[in-house]
Amino acid sequence: MTTRRPRVLVQLDNLELGGAQINAVQLSAAVAEHGYDSLLVGPRDTLPAGPSVLDVSADYGVTARAYERPAPLFAHGRVLSRMARGYGASLVHAFSTSERAAYWGAGFLGRRALVRTIYEMSFDPRTHPSIPLVIGTGYLRDELAGRRGGVTLVSPPVDMARDAPGVTDRAAFRRDLGLAADAVVLVIVSRISEEMKAHGIEDAIHAVERLGDPRVCLIVVGTGDAAARLRVLADVVNVRLGRTAVVFAGPLADPRPAYDAADIVLGMGSSAARGLAFGKPLVVLGERGWSAVFREPGVAAIFRNSFWSPYEVTDGAGLLTGNLRPLVADAGERERLGAEARVFAERNFGLAAMAGRLADVYEQALRTASSHQWVRDLGMEGRIMAAKLGRLSGRRPSGALEWKQRDTDVVSQPVEGVGR
């Protein structure tokens, strides 16, 4: 008699080409090797006009669907319940989104196991305590040790076979953008959003001008609410330099040619990790002007903080210019750091290893889910509702359930100090 493979409904908060969404696709594909089949679902109203997660899912052979998401919590729960029932899912994985709709819907009374992933830089205190939690940062793993439902570090994964030097036609990508043969190409692959991302991209545009090296070009891949403003800034810089030094390439469903074509990658989070996998020297961008070259002695601290920092720098463009100048000038140093980058990526966030960790979390969730645990977590729901009622009545909330997604207190001092 054959036993049916367990099925997982993976709930995404949106279908844009964000790092967390791509990570969800990659992990869903890789966890199939451990016996789990996955269906990814995301709200239809988040589908972008251009490439989306649906394109990435098709590339990886993972089924993904857009659905109509009602605003009320319980109505949303019923929709998730119908999708889980129709797919035959025994587990719902809320990936970088609230699990409350799944708690009241597909997971009601513990009839299906629940898992939540938080690939943010801080912990959401509204998370149900009994639900197994996946996080992507070392400092959160340390802070949440002893949590009732457990906490597992699954670093934002990188597919080391697909994300590797030479997998694309590097020369063709550079040629299509009109780059000179001796160009030193800086690449940023990112959502171009005012939240978290825009500051670093703006600093990079100014740094290209300050470097004063006619070989340097910056390629920005992605789109978002800050794209129009930053394109205008790039046009102004290009006019002042008398050349096309900054190029906005738009969103790419497959950004591998951009990584492969880079001489230096700039970025944070999963984009930074992919840059390392391509064997590129990396300059990590924080969200408020901080930046640092990924090299000793700062490697361990930067990795523990998921290639990110909230540290505020008065002259971020100046700091970034100083970090870039030696790399731009020294091809040998770029080659050395690139070789070290690839080795580091293989050891610390290869997709196969991270999928194994996630499979262990799924096994734990299926083994421990129960009506008793579900009822036990009603206390969290009570606190959430009490906080909402307090706000409606005009009482100031205690703040205990406020999710400060980029709380600077959770970032360790060593990272803030790197590159000062």
Image (cartoon, grey):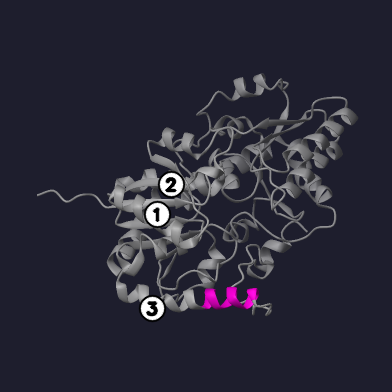
Q: Disc 3 to disc 1, how far (Cα)?
A: 22 Å
Q: Residue furthest left?
A: 1
Q: Are marks 2 and 1 in contact (CB under 8 Å)?
A: yes
Q: Going 77% across and 42% down the picture, which residue do you hit? A: 204
Q: Going 59% across and 65% down the picture, which residue do you hit? A: 122
The foreground one among 343 and 96 is: 96
Q: Which mark is residue 376?
A: 3
Can you say whether 241 is above or below 370 in the image?
above
Q: Is residue 279 left or right of residue 231?
A: left
Q: Going 38% across and 78% down the picture, which residue do you hit? A: 376
Can you say whether 401 is above or below 38 in the image?
below
Three-letter code for the amino acid on which mark 2 is drawn: Val
User: Sequence order check: which comes first, mark 2 or mark 3?
Assistant: 2
Can you say whether 245 is above or below 372 in the image?
above
Magenta-drawn segment: 383-392
User: Considering the numbered disc 1 on the image, is that residue within a helix, a strand or a loop?
Assistant: helix
Is residue 99 visible in this depiction of the protein? Answer: no
User: Considering the numbered disc 3 on the image, is that residue within a helix, a strand or a loop?
Assistant: helix
